[in-house]
Image: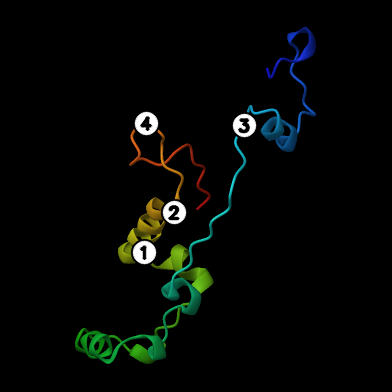
């Protein structure tokens, strides 16, 4: 309720004011992008070893074309997700008691 007059909440209490008053913490936006997400997957981004493996599996390497912005909707890459979580854990504000867990965090994915 942020000590509102008469105990009534104030819908116009801004985030900036709540941070200034010490009720909320300010936030920092971190954006994580990998080469995989930036460049997508095309014949030119697939290693020769992987191209050979795909051809042995009967796949046409020339037909593989995923734009980076389409990746998470079409392709799941556990390695990319692992890198994003690892970078988050390195960069996040840690819980002050344990020191190893992230503090309160909102993730938009």
- Name the side, left or right, on which 61 lies relative to 30: left
Q: Secondary structure at mark 2?
A: helix
Mark 4 crowdedness (10 Å alpha carbons): few <14, some 14-19, many ≥20: few
Mark 4 vs mark 2: in front: 4
Q: Which of marks 3 and 4 precedes in the sequence?
A: 3
Residue 74 drawn above or below residue 102 = below
Mark 3 crowdedness (10 Å alpha carbons): few <14, some 14-19, many ≥20: few
Q: Which of marks 3 and 1 precedes in the sequence?
A: 3
Q: Which of marks 2 and 4 precedes in the sequence?
A: 2
**Residue tagged by mark 1?**
76
Q: Secondary structure at mark 4?
A: loop
Q: Which of marks 2 and 3 precedes in the sequence?
A: 3
> CA gap, disc 1 to disc 3?
35 Å
State whether residue 67 appears in this view: no
> CA gap, disc 1 to disc 2?
24 Å
Based on the displayed image, in which of its 4 quarters is residue 81 positioned? Answer: bottom left
Q: Secondary structure at mark 3?
A: loop
Q: Which of marks 4 and 1 precedes in the sequence?
A: 1
Q: Residue at x 36, y 65 (%)?
A: 80
**Residue tagged by mark 3?**
24
Mark 4 vs mark 3: in front: 4
Q: Residue at x 62, y 41 (%)?
A: 26
Q: Which mark is residue 47?
A: none
**Residue tagged by mark 2?**
91
State whether residue 26 appears in this view: yes
Mark 2 crowdedness (10 Å alpha carbons): few <14, some 14-19, many ≥20: few
> CA gap, disc 4 to disc 3?
18 Å
Based on the displayed image, in which of its 4 quarters is residue 88 positioned? Answer: bottom left
**Residue tagged by mark 4?**
97
- Tag 1–tag 2 contact (CB < 8 Å): no
> CA gap, disc 3 to disc 2?
20 Å
Residue 26 drawn above or below residue 72 = above
């Amino acid at each position: 309720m942020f000590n509102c007059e008469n105990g009534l909440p104030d819908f116009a209490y801004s985030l900036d004011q709540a941070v200034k008053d010490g009720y909320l913490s300010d936030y920092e936006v971190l954006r994580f992008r990998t080469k995989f997400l930036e460049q997508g997957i095309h014949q030119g981004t697939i290693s020769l070893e992987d191209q050979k493996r795909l051809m042995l599996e009967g796949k046409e390497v020339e037909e593989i074309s995923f734009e980076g912005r389409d990746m998470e909707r079409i392709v799941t890459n556990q390695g990319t997700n692992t890198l994003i979580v690892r970078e988050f854990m390195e960069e996040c504000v840690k819980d002050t008691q344990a020191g190893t867990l992230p503090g309160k965090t909102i993730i938009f994915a």
